[in-house]
Image (cartoon, rainbow, N blue to C red):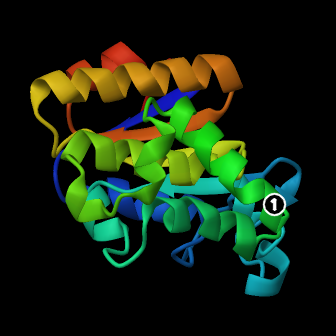
Amino acid sequence: EVLGLVGESGSGKTTIGKTLLRLYEPLDGTIRYGDTDITHLSEAALRPIRPQLQMVFQDPLSSLNPRHSIRTTLATPLLVHSRAKSGEIDSRVEETLNLVGLPASFKHRFPHEMSGGQLQRVAIGRALILNPSLIVADEPVSKLDVSVRAKILNLFKDIQASTGIALVFITHDLRVARYLCDRIA
C-alpha cells in the first residue's frame, strides 16, 4: 500500500523516513522489517536488507552525482549489491529507464542535461533498480511545477500498481496525499 506521512515543515517527516530506513539511529521504539527487528542491527547485519529499503529524495539534482552519467547512476546500486553481471547492466538500466518513462538513450546523459521531472524519474529509477519491497519517497514532487508533478504522481501510482511495492510518501500537501495514498498518517 501507499502510506502518506503528512505534516508541516519541520515536523520531523524526513527524520522518520530516514529512521525507517536506518539512515538515522533510532533513540526509542522498534523498527520491524518483516519478521526482523532492525532497530539496532549493525551495518554488517543491515547489508543484506538494504537493497530492499530504498529512498527517493526531495531534490534529485543534489542527490545525483553531476559527474556520473545516468547509466552509471543506475548501474552503481546493481554493482554495489552484486545484483547483476556486467553483461546485464545495460539491459537492466534500459528496462528501468523504460519503467520510469524515459527513453534508453537517456543513459548517456548527465544530470545537468535533464529537466527536474526527468531527474526525478531517474531518482525513482535508482530506487527501483534493486526491486525493493519498500520505498520512502521524501517530498518527491514538491520542487516540480504542477504539470510535471501530476505526471510523477501518476508514475508512482502506476509503479505501485504494477509492482506491488510498499511506499511511504512524505508530503506536506494533503491534496497530493489524498490522490496517491491508501492511508494517511
Q: Quadrant of residue 37?
A: bottom right
Amino acid type, label 1:
Gly
Q: Is residue 125 left or right of residue 134?
A: left
Residue 181 seen in the figure: no
Q: Residue at x 54, y 77 (%)?
A: 27
Residue nearest the observer in this picture, 130 or 139: 130
Q: Residue at x 43, y 35 (%)?
A: 102
Q: Which residue is under mark 1?
A: 87
Q: Quadrant of residue 80?
A: bottom right
Residue 136 seen in the figure: yes
Q: Residue at x 58, y 24 (%)?
A: 160
| Element on which disc 1 rests | helix
Residue nearest the observer in this picture, 112 or 9: 112
Q: Position of residue 158 (x, y in %)?
A: 52, 18
Q: Quadrant of residue 20?
A: bottom right
Q: Position of residue 49 (x, y in %)?
A: 79, 63
Q: Residue at x 38, y 19 (%)?
A: 154
Image quarter in which the C terminus is found: top left
